[in-house]
Amino acid sequence: MTQIVLTPIGRVRSDVAASKEDYWGNIVSTIEVENEQLESGALRGLEEFSHVEVLFHLSGVPESSIERGSRHPRNNPNWPKVGILAQRAKSRPNRIAATICQIIEVGQKSLTVRGLDAFDGSPVLDIKPIFSEFVPDKTQIKQPQWSHEMMEHYFQSDI
């Protein structure tokens, strides 16, 4: 297979620096854009959107923990063993994550968002505005019961 090399366009700045599984709902993060990757004005126009999708690299996940087959989500034996591509686990082969976040503020070289489930220092690979046409009707989304259980507290506010 051809190797793909990606260069981060920025870094996440957040108070979350350690392992965290749930309660990302009120986490506020700032994405600092790298001067070498983007010119001034690259964020212009984002203030007209309510949400963005942030693609970032799970750089803190060691290569040795990568799953290439199947496992129980979050290693919970009460949930079925499913393939790594049937879950959104951090131990995926390319360690790429994607999260839809609420825009709080757009700066010249920074973007502040709410609900980004990335640790401080995570490399940001891309930022895309959310167009309603890209989000399927939620009533048409099908997913297994275990995933609802797993995500029950994920984007709730911290207790």
Image: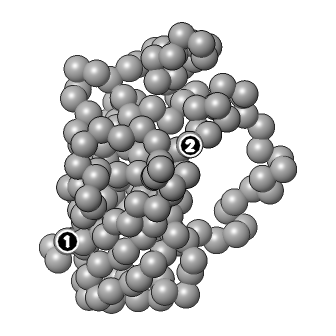
Q: Position of residue 61 (x, y in %)?
A: 26, 33
Residue name at image x 84 percent, y 50 percent: 139
Q: Residues within 10 Å of mark 1 (few under 14, many from 20)?
A: some
Quick one: 34 or 114, which is closer to the camera?
A: 114
Can the viewer see residue 22 in this picture? yes
Q: Position of residue 63 (x, y in %)?
A: 23, 26
Query: Is residue 87 positioned above or below 134 on the image?
Result: above
Amino acid type, residue under disc 2 in the picture: His
Amino acid type, residue under disc 1 in the picture: Glu
Residue under label 2: 153
Residue name at image x 35 percent, y 36 percent: 94
Q: Secondary structure at mark 1?
A: loop
Q: Is residue 130 left or right of residue 6?
A: right
Query: Is residue 77 positioned above or below 51 on the image?
Result: above
- Any mark on residue 34, and which? 1
Quick one: 80 or 68, which is closer to the camera?
A: 80
Quick one: 8 or 137, which is closer to the camera?
A: 137
- Any mark on residue 53, and which? none
Quick one: 63 or 105, which is closer to the camera?
A: 105
Q: Secondary structure at mark 2?
A: loop
Residue name at image x 24 percent, y 55 percent: 120
Q: Is residue 106 left or right of residue 121?
A: right
Q: Quadrant of residue 77?
A: top right
Marks 2/1: CA–CA distance:
33 Å
Q: Are marks 2 and 1 in contact (CB under 8 Å)?
A: no
Residue name at image x 59 percent, y 39 percent: 151
